[in-house]
Image (cartoon, rainbow, N blue to C red):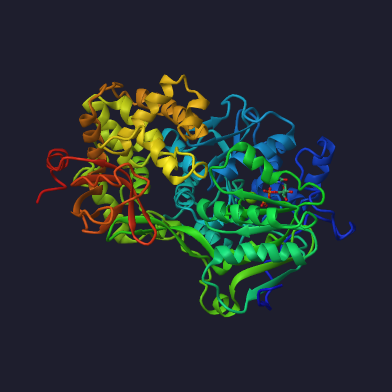
Amino acid sequence: MSRFWRPGSERPQPSSLSVLEDDEPGFLPFSTLASNSSYGYGGLERHRQRLPVFKYRTAILYLLETHATTIIVGETGSGKTTQIPQYLKEAGWADGGRVVVCTQPRRLAVQTVASRVAEEMDVKLGEEVGYTIRFEDLTKSAVTRIKFLTDGVLLREMMDDPLLSKYSVVMVDEAHERSLSTDMLLGLLKKIQRRRPELRLIISSATIEAKSIAAFFNQSKKKLPASRDFGPSREPAILSVEGRGYDVQIHFLEEPVSNYLQAAVSTVLDIHNQEPMGDVLVFLTGQDDIDAAVQMLTDEAQNLAAHRSGLLVLPLYAGLSRAEQELVFSPTPRGKRKVVIATNIAETSLTLEGMVYVVDSGFSKQRFYNPITDIESLVVAPISKASARQRAGRAGRVRPGKCFRLYTEEYFESEMPLEGIPEMQRSNLVSCVIQLKALGIDNILGFDWLASPSPEGMIRALEVLYSLGILDEDSKLTSPTGFQVAEMPLDPMLSRMIISGSQFGCSEEMIIIAAFLSLQSIWVIGRGTQKELDEAKQGFAVAEGDHITYLNVYKGFLLSGKSSQWCHKNLINYQAMKKVLEIREQLHKLVQRLGLVLKSCGQDTQVVRKAITSGFFAHACRLESSSHGGMYKTIRTSQEVYIHPSSVLFRVTPKWVVYHSLVSTDCQYMRNVIAVDSSWFTELAPHFFQI
Ligand code: CDP
Ligand code: MG
């Protein structure tokens, strides 16, 4: 290979598992296992029995009878997510109106595993097997027996049903990811178990971190009554699902590279030119670099001589359409080499069959929050050794594989952190605090945390909630507004904005805006030039800012009769607009359920901007200098920030603005910005702007 690679000494640990039994031929033609449609029902049944977890079926069911909590560790692809809920149902845990529920940290994983399980059970998705993610509920309460949902949705369900009384078994899956919601759930489930000894917990994880979780469930703050004779043991059981793995040869770079994107692309081309057939999985960080890599590889593939091409390059990240997802999971056509370029979603939450080569950039996008500046940003950061091992393991599932790490062995050994930092310790805690408060947990610092959040983060969150009028002076959730905000599945600042909207007579506008803000972008990116896109935007743009521009887009879309041609003509993403309608509909129902007034303010954009400001005053900024697209400083912490080029205010630079979110690249950019009047600050949030 043209790059200088050095073979690494270590093997991925625990060794990756295989779906093959010993008596089968060692090598399978690629993707014979991958096809969803290529097997009949009988084939699926056989496939299920070959999964490593199948040998442990009886053991799992026995542990569940005898233990309140069972921790199951097994490599990605061993069948934990898709099989265990089915075993539980087959054993009667979903009889008598009860439901088996399984959480995932990622929405895309919820959708794909639910549809896979429905297919294996030969039922229609949304009936016996269903799923719920934010703004999308595909379950039928009287019919659904196995339900997949995000950890965040299960937390929300606790507000209406604090003991989760519908569920017989809660499986907290992908616990090693240590998402914010998973950590909160584990603490809360431990509490629920004291009140509901019949509830069973399964905690599943792809890494051996199980011991700390077991210790967590073992220790108890209060002395528990001695376990009754026939009750389940309170001591958690740990089960490790073993399987035989294929070796993965690890290759490190001899010299570090500065551009991992370019390095990833040329490594894929080298593999394609020099290695035997077999699919390639590339780990990059997010939609931007993945789309760029897909483009570069597709261009290259077209330049290759006809006999050389045969590359099928596909992206995989959250927010893909259903059709794009299906492409990734469908079998590789004969004679082709599939290259999937993914975020760390393919690390453990989704299983891709047939991967033989892994290219690991060594980076992922991670959330980091700084409580001092109050800025949360999604930044490209180095992964941990644990993640690097998981990534490598993806190459050895169907036959021996190779992993190309785009970093040096010295770096891996001496600089890469052993494990990632739990999200709890690097996130803005506003939503977390309000949810715990709504569940009646007032002493948040004293909560039974798996990993304690930072006191600075907590204090900052309490401050924000107080300034929004959600918590009172004793940090208690007492006001009706507070409870309404807690009920909304949105960032508390957005919820506050909607509630103000109902007080100011513009709640209809607020929920439309909230729907737009829930999406990444509504503009079609990649078709047409930047100039064309800017022109298309100008057709809707107003000097009041992006939020008002969205209202114009919405009106135009309705006037066009929700036409896809209209979207096409205006470089607007039709799928995104359909999503806006859906979310608006959901928020509409929610606002009605909360008893808020639904009203439109017509053309009065001032009242709309005031309502937004009443939720987002903490994001107020003042123009410092109009050169270079306008340099602003945040009122609260005097941080330097700039208007993002995608904003309609990029060239307008009003004196005072309020932004929705910040993205950090070379500097901090404000996305979704409105122009405001500074007198509104003291009018709407006097306690915050005292000076
Ligand atoms: O949860 P875990 O990583 O242990 O495995 P799983 O997601 O239950 O996947 C078990 C097996 O089901 C995989 O090895 C795939 O063969 C298959 N599967 C699939 O073909 N399509 C899916 N969407 C999900 C799983
Ligand atoms: Mg899984």
**Is residue 405 something one can see in this rendering?**
yes
**Relative to the observer, which residue lies in front, 3 or 217?**
3
Image spot of residue 354 (x, y percent):
75, 54
Image spot of residue 347 (x, y percent):
61, 57
Image spot of residue 688 (x, y percent):
16, 47
Residue drawn at x 25%, y 23% as measured from the top left: 603
Q: Is residue 511 left or right of residue 104?
A: left
Residue drawn at x 49%, y 50% as measured from the top left: 182
Residue drawn at x 29%, y 51% as measured from the top left: 461
**Is residue 102 something one can see in this rendering?**
no
Q: Is residue 333 left or right of residue 362?
A: right
Residue drawn at x 57%, y 43% as measured from the top left: 108
Q: Is residue 681 left or right of residue 519?
A: left
Q: How many marks?
A: 0
Image spot of residue 387 (x, y percent):
58, 64
Up/down of 349 relative to 260, above or below: above
Extreme residue toward the left, this view: 691
Quarter the N terminus occupies: bottom right
**Relative to the observer, which residue lies in front, 137 or 160?**
137
Q: Is residue 485 left or right of residue 365?
A: left
